């Protein structure tokens, strides 16, 4: 449909993504869906998750105040580290907002609870921060590099945050957890391969390339040849 060419290594990347996704789905734990905003608030105020949030905010502040002025224009991990760290907190807030909207539409209003507005505020702040630094990363570095690195960092931190908050892996055996990790690594590898081997964009039209061939000089402009012969041959 998009008329894009997929190279051989690109096919390998696609297959890797599909295989990794299938492995993750097969061994994925039973998801626990909170039934209210208060339940998510209880999970979010667990000591383990509070430590994760505190560590995340400390890392973000260090990246913004110290590393960005010094290394922001040369190291892609600075901008993407900020985006990914804030993104892992955004996912939790968005999930709480989604449950609040669902319950409100069912007739159980969640707007009276301060936790709902707290999650909305956190989500807005995190999303604005993400978009700001993601745009900086795209303006500074090649999108072919930004996309896979951001995907890997954001997905990894989101999984860690969800595992700490919801404890999805608590009832699983070691083999299932190992299979999920292997599947996740396979998906990440396939994503990196896809972006690393994707077809380069063609050069823009209108460029002129001059070269000498025998007694004539030829110019190439938008696939048209211009022959300029010397005055002696005329």
Image (cartoon, helix red, strand yellow):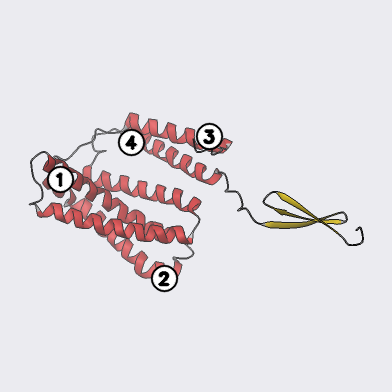
Q: Where is residue 119 in the image (x, y as percent from the top left)?
A: 18, 53
Q: How far apart are marks 1 and 3 (CA)?
A: 41 Å
Tell me the residue at 64%/55% (across/down): 206
Disc number lying in front (1 or 4): 1
Q: In this view, does 212 lie above or below 172?
A: below
SS under mark 4: helix
Are the residues at dot 1 and dot 2 in contact (C-beta closer than 8 Å)?
no
Are the residues at dot 4 and dot 3 in contact (C-beta closer than 8 Å)?
no
Q: Distance between the residues labelled 1 and 2?
A: 39 Å
Which mark identifies residue 69?
2
- Front residue of 201 and 21: 201
Which residue lies under the disc numbered 1?
Answer: 100
Which residue lies under the disc numbered 4?
Answer: 177
Q: In the displayed structure, does residue 149 sit left or right of residue 37? A: right
Tell me the residue at 41%/51% (across/down): 150
Q: In the displayed structure, does residue 184 sit left or right of residue 123? A: right
SS under mark 1: helix
């Amino acid at each position: 449909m998009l008329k894009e060419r997929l190279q051989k290594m690109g096919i390998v990347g696609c297959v890797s993504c599909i295989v990794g996704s299938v492995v993750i789905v097969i061994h994925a734990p039973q998801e626990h869906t909170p039934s209210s905003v208060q339940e998510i608030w209880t999970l979010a105020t667990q000591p383990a998750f509070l430590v994760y949030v505190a560590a995340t905010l400390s890392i973000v502040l260090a990246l913004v105040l110290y590393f960005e002025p010094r290394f922001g224009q040369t190291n892609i991990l600075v901008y993407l580290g900020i985006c990914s760290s804030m993104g892992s907190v955004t996912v939790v807030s968005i999930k709480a907002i989604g449950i609040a909207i669902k319950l409100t539409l069912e007739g159980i209003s969640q707007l009276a609870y301060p936790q709902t507005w707290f999650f909305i505020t956190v989500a807005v702040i995190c999303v604005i921060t993400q978009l700001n630094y993601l745009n900086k990363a795209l303006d500074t570095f090649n999108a072919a590099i930004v996309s896979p690195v951001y995907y890997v960092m954001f997905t990894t931190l989101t999984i860690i945050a969800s595992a700490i908050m919801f404890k999805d892996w608590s009832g699983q055996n070691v083999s299932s957890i190992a299979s999920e990790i292997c599947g996740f690594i396979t998906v990440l590898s396939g994503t990196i391969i896809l972006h690393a081997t994707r077809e380069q964009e063609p050069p823009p039209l209108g460029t002129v390339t001059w070269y000498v061939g025998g007694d004539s000089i030829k110019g190439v402009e938008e696939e048209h040849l211009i022959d300029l012969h010397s005055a002696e041959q005329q």
